[in-house]
Image (cartoon, grey):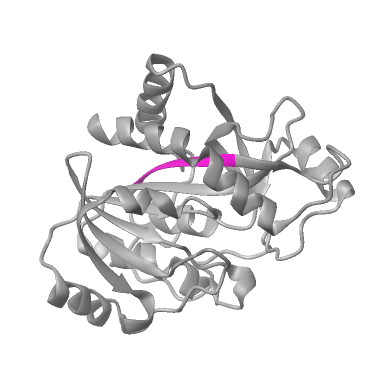
Amino acid sequence: MLKESVDYIRSITDKKVEIGIISGSGLGGLADKIENPVFIDYKDIPHFAVSTAPNHIGRFVIGDYCGKNVICMQGRLHYYEGHSMKDVIYPVQVMNKLGVKVLIVTNAAGGINTSFSVGDIMMITDHINMMGTNPFIGKNDDEEGLRFFDMTHAYSPRLCEIADCVAKENNIDLKHGVYVSTTGPSFETPAEVKAFRILGGDAVGMSTVPEVIAANHCSMEVLAFSLITNTAAGVSDVLLSGDDVIEIGKKKATVLSKLVDEVLYRL
């Protein structure tokens, strides 16, 4: 399956990619900055699932970005859409076969940490998987990665250090924190958010962790950012809305884009 997917993409473009980018809710504009773009819809790639999440276009964009050859997922796949975990991580495995060694992941998240404000950017330093499953349950492909693989440095210390330097030099208030992943599609209850805070969570969302697990399985370096688009349930009295998440994402994406740009220049 992977070979057929990769062969299809290579039949459209022979560009050798080195950096993968996954854009989250309201953050698809990152792909608009790619020069000499080649667009490949997920629906046209053999064995690929199709994104149905709001504001997720559902295509790869391959081209030049900040002096690097990149492949960007303009819209990701979520477990809550009804996709299997294997489907959710499949794009990461395809990117690995295309040559990607560094994966930059973005998402929109709810702030659990009471010191966070809407619009803050949090660099993910670790995660807590509350999705109740793991994408590598089942038979392992030893050619792709180890059966039991280490997750101590799921988020690359080297890349995190670069991001911190970029943030400092550009006066970007970059928060650090632990991301909690849930299945969705309902937002979390106040009691759940309180429990996640006790566990050490700083932000919560419905994506990212499966893809990061998959990237670590195939030995990619990962850098990930959450844009805090809302306060999680119970942190404030404001009711949560998916439309608000997308709107805040669009408004604050410029700062996150600047951060990603400068990180890429230094890789």
Query: How many numbered discs sit on the rendered protein?
Result: 0
Q: Is residue 25 above or below residue 166?
A: below
| Residue 151 versus residue 210 in the image, above or below | above
Q: Left or right of 118: which side holds 233?
A: right
Q: Give the vertical position of 79 relative to 210 (above or below).
A: below
User: In the depicted view, which residue is nearer to us: 228 or 6?
Assistant: 228
Image quarter where the C terminus lies is: top left
Residue 58 figure quarter: bottom left
Does 249 appear in magenta? no
Q: Is residue 15 visible?
A: yes
Highlighted range, magenta: 221-227
The residue shown at (34%, 53%) is: 31
Q: Position of residue 150 (x, y in %)?
A: 45, 47
Note whether 161 is above or below 102 in the view shown.
above
- Residue located 38% across and 81% down the image: 43
Where is residue 15 drawn, in percent x and y? Answer: 12, 60
| Closest to the observer, 199 or 264 | 264
Decide whether the magenta segment is chiefly helix, strand or loop. Answer: strand
The quadrant the N terminus occupies is bottom left
Q: Position of residue 96 (x, y in %)?
A: 28, 60
Is residue 219 at all visible to an observer of this figure?
no
Q: Is residue 223 a member of the stretch shown in magenta?
A: yes
Between residues 112 and 227, which one lies in front from this camera angle?
A: 227
**Which residue shows up at 38% across the image and 15% down it?**
169
Instruction: Identify which residue is drawn at 38% across, 19% down.
Output: 165
